[in-house]
Image: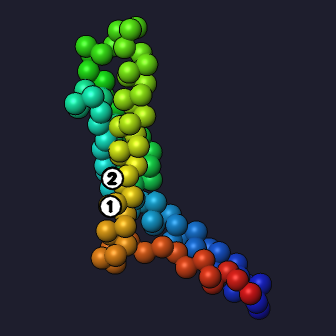
Amino acid sequence: MAMFNKLKEVKDLRSQAKEMKNVLSEITASGSAMGGKVKITMDGNQEVQSVEIDKDLLQPENQVKVQEAVLTAINGAVKDIQKTMAKKMRSGELEMPDLDTLQG
């Protein structure tokens, strides 16, 4: 009987995780660098949805600057997602699955 309960708990957690992934996919955040010439948009699952680079930057001599700008924009988007998720968790809009149910 205990094994059946554990399997049910695992199934419930998977279901909750899938639901959370769906909710997070609807959240978007963006980061930018170089005065908005490099923009990154990602979803709440921290998957990059788009990358925009101003065409004037696409010159070989700008390669290092553009690479650094992309990193800055991605990190900005990640921080934005983290703030949004924390806000949603505090407000009760987003709940983390209870992993404690798997112990014991």
What label does residue 84 carry, if any?
1
> Between marks 1 and 2, how big is the CA–CA gap?
6 Å
Determine whether 32 is above or below 90 in the image.
Answer: above
Could you tell me the amino acid type at mark 1?
Thr
Question: What count of labels does the image hold?
Answer: 2
Q: Position of residue 55 (x, y in %)?
A: 27, 15
Say if residue 8 shows up in the picture.
no
Q: In this rendering, would 20 be left or right of 31?
A: right
Could you tell me the amino acid type at mark 2?
Asp
What residue lies at 60% left-to-right and 77% top-to-bottom? 99
Determine whether 75 is above or below 34 in the image.
Answer: below
- Do the numbered discs 1 and 2 sit on residues whose CB atoms are within 8 Å? yes
Say if residue 103 shows up in the picture.
yes
What label does residue 80 carry, if any?
2
Closest to the observer: 58 or 101? 58
Q: Position of residue 76 (x, y in %)?
A: 35, 44
Residue 95 found in image quarter: bottom left
Q: Position of residue 86 (x, y in %)?
A: 37, 67
Q: Residues within 10 Å of mark 2 (few under 14, many from 20)?
A: some
Determine whether 40 is above or below 90 in the image.
Answer: above
Residue 23 found in image quarter: bottom left
Q: Position of residue 66 (x, y in %)?
A: 38, 22
Quarter of the picture containing the C terminus is bottom right
